[in-house]
Image: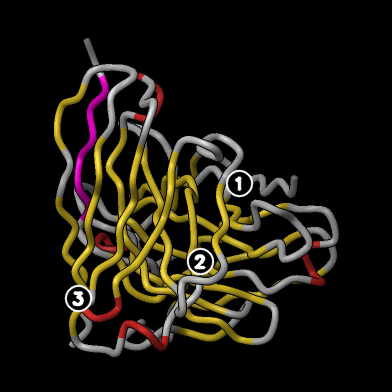
Amino acid sequence: EVQLLESGGGLVQPGRSLRLSCVASGFTLSNYAMSWVRQAPGKGLEWVSAISGSGGDTYYADSVKGRFTISRDNSKNTLYLQMNSLRVEDTAVYYCAKVYITGTTVRFDYWGQGTLVTVSS
Amino acid sequence: SYVLTQPPSVSVAPGQTARITCGGNNIGSKSVHWYQQKAGQAPVLVVYDDSDRASGIPERFSGSNFGNTATLTISRVEAGDEADYYCQVWDSSSDHPGVFGGGTKLTVL
């Protein structure tokens, strides 16, 4: 059974940093790209970032480019999101999602339960 | 960047058919995926590649994609189908390829 468990969320002041983790089980992490998707309170889903299975390719939404860094440690079955220079508008539940690629399309076939990040002074 | 447009809300009586649209420029040339998110829960993939049902999803859920509109159709709607539904594409020509629609709240009357 595929399971994704996020951690690392919490309350942080604007301008500070936070690192999220997502531990994967039930599949071989290195065989799959992974992604982070966030959802601000009462709002819709927003794709944040993605990383290839090897970690060699990364992608970011414009809203986080230059501030967030996605990475992975396949030996630890763990995906990370390093968030720097946090802004109030980064407040959201952050979901870790397993990526399934067919041809040129990507879908998110499994999701974690999410971790809440609140940026406030 | 690529934009997906969904109606904010759709209402339907139990037993009727709900249709949730997702508009995008020539979206018919892309593969569209749909997610269901019930209150307080994580999203769940329900339909992928326009019309394939994900594992465990009832046959009542179907999808289509032509021209500038993709549609998620839910037949014989049940109270348990009440949720937010999101469409998603991957715009591989973009530097920021992940795109979600704004979401549609399905209310079962």
Q: Tell me the chief SS of the magenta region.
A: strand
Q: Amino acid at mark 2?
A: Trp
What residue sits 23% from the left and 62% below the top?
A22
What chain does badge 1 belong to?
A: B
Cβ–Cβ below 8 Å for labels 2 and 1? Answer: no
What residue sits 53% from the left and 71% below the top?
A56
Please state which of residues A90 and A85 is positioned toward the viewer in this rendering: A85
What residue does disc 1 label? B6
Pinpoint residue B76: horizontal percent, then vertical percent: 40, 72
Q: Is residue A90 left or right of residue A13?
A: right
What chain does badge 2 belong to?
A: B
Please state which of residues A98 and A70 is positioned toward the viewer in this rendering: A70
What residue does disc 2 label? B34
Q: Residues within 10 Å of mark 1 (few under 14, many from 20)?
A: many
Q: Amino acid at mark 1?
A: Gln
Label 3 or label 1, whichever lies nearer to me, is 3
Q: CA distance from mark 3 to mark 2?
A: 31 Å
Pinpoint residue B2: horizontal percent, then vertical percent: 74, 49
Q: Amino acid at mark 3?
A: Lys
Residue range highlighted in magenta? A114-119
- Position of A15 relative to B78 (above/below): above
Q: Which mark is residue A21?
A: none
What residue does disc 3 label? A76
